[in-house]
Image (cartoon, rainbow, N blue to C red):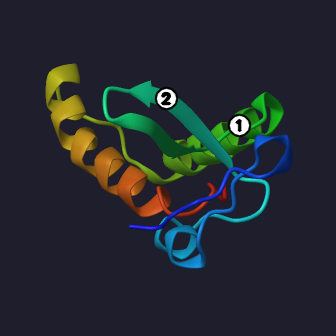
Amino acid sequence: MALLKLRRFFQLTLPAEVRKQFYLAEGDYLEAEAVEEGILLKPVRVVERKKAWECMGKVRDRVHATLPPHQKRPQEQEEEIAPVVKDDRTRQSSRHPEC
């Protein structure tokens, strides 16, 4: 466990090993939450709306261009897609999204 000192203007410096473990870089955002045990800092991603829409458009175009028409019910489609989405989120959680 690292000991941090609150500096001028209430700033903290996270130890290098913590920054590396969570793939944090200068300019990244952390969410601060008051919890029973103290203060919890959680890395969060912030994406500009315009960039998010551009990324979604690229993904949509790739999916529509490569997948054949489906013959499954919506529930079956969702059950098939959910593990893929979960895996993708896990892989991207350590880095910022790259369309």
- Residue 89 lies, in percent from the top left, at 41, 50
Residue at image point 38% right, 67% down: 1
Q: Label 2 sits on what residue type?
A: Glu
- The secondary structure type at the circle numbered 1 is helix
| Snapshot quadrant of residue 45 | top right
Which numbered circle lies on residue 52? Answer: 1
> Within 10 Å of the Cα at label 1, are there few (<14), some (14-19), or many (20+) other Cα atoms?
some
Q: Which residue lies furthest to the top in this view?
A: 74
Q: Which of marks 1 and 2 is nearer the N terminus?
A: 2
Is 64 drawn above or below residue 92 in the view shown? Answer: above
- Residue 19 lies, in percent from the top left, at 57, 69
- Residue 40 lies, in percent from the top left, at 44, 39
Which numbered circle lies on residue 6? Answer: none
Q: Which residue in the protein does label 2 denote?
A: 33
**Is residue 71 in view from this perspective?**
no
- The secondary structure type at the circle numbered 2 is strand
> Within 10 Å of the Cα at label 2, are there few (<14), some (14-19), or many (20+) other Cα atoms?
few
Q: Nearer the viewer, residue 17 or 38?
A: 38
Residue at image point 57% right, 36% down: 31
Q: Nearer the viewer, residue 40 or 70?
A: 40
Is 84 drawn above or below residue 49 in the view shown? Answer: below
